[in-house]
Amino acid sequence: MKKKISQRKIFLSIFSIMVVLVGGLVINFIINQNLISAENDVTVLENEENIVAIVNDEKITIEELDEFIHFHELIMTLYEIDYFFVQFLTSTEAGEEFLNEYRKWSLDDLIMNKLLEQEAKNIKKITSNEERDTIFQEHLEMVEFDYGLNEEQLLLILQQDGITSLDHYQEVFFEHDGFVALIQYNLFKDIIIEDNEIEELYNLYYKGTLAFEEVKEDLKHELLWEKQDNIWFDFLDNLWENADFEITI
């Protein structure tokens, strides 16, 4: 965030332009040096391999954790707001402890992310190509609906990230963000909503005010979402409780 420029004196505006054109290079250099200093000075672990956790025999490094919490972007943003606060964080024992506590606080989320990735690898082995195509198509429809895009517009956006086709996007999707969709598809695909469940919900909330056929589909979706939520959170609880992990940070 750029500092506000005083409107009272013209020469301050001229000076600010000089700072942007000439001093900007110096400021960026200083920021980069502080980021390097932060990497070198903040002592996080007692082991030489920079391992913060071991999840089902898979190691998580401090670099992976910092990438997960956008550590460098965070330091950069703080630097632009308050240079002295960044100095405090990166050059004092109290600052180091603060950063390390933030890392520890974020580590549970990364561990769960790792557990989901591991689970998805196992599920992918028993998921057919047709099922993966179905999962990806549902993802495409959701993205296009949420952002008001057609297929051509979506492809133009993807090409800016080097993705050349929808087949290429499908590969990238399952390598990175698609693991949750893969797990949820396998968890939810056998859910059945019975007519008597819909009628029971209708009688409880809408009987006498709206016709059954008028709200039937909405009630069916509401019951489906409720069952999906219950299944998902039970799955996450079991996944966490049965995982073998050790935190070393």
Image: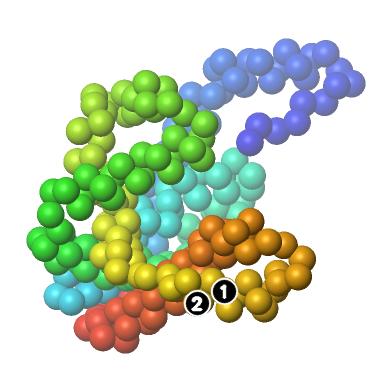
The circle drawn on residue 199 is 1
Residue 158 is tagged as: none
Residue at screen point 46% across, 67% down:
224
Amino acid type, residue under disc 2 in the picture: Asn
Assign a secondary structure to mark 2: helix
Which quadrant is home to the C terminus? bottom left
Residue at screen point 69% across, 20% down: 16
- Whether residue 228 is visible to the viewer of this picture, yes or no, is yes
Q: Identify the residue position indicated by label 2 in the image.
A: 196
- In three-dimensional space, the C-alpha distance between marks 1 and 2, rounded to whole angstroms, equals 5 Å
* Residue 246 picture quarter: bottom left
- Left or right, 183 with reference to 206: left
Badge 1: few (under 14), some or many (20 or more) residues near its Cα, within 10 Å? some
Of the pair 119 and 95, the residue shown nearer to us: 119
* Residue at x 50% of width, y 44% of height: 76
When the figure is inspected, residue 133 is found, relative to residue 55, above or below; the finding is above
Q: Position of residue 205 (x, y in %)?
A: 70, 73
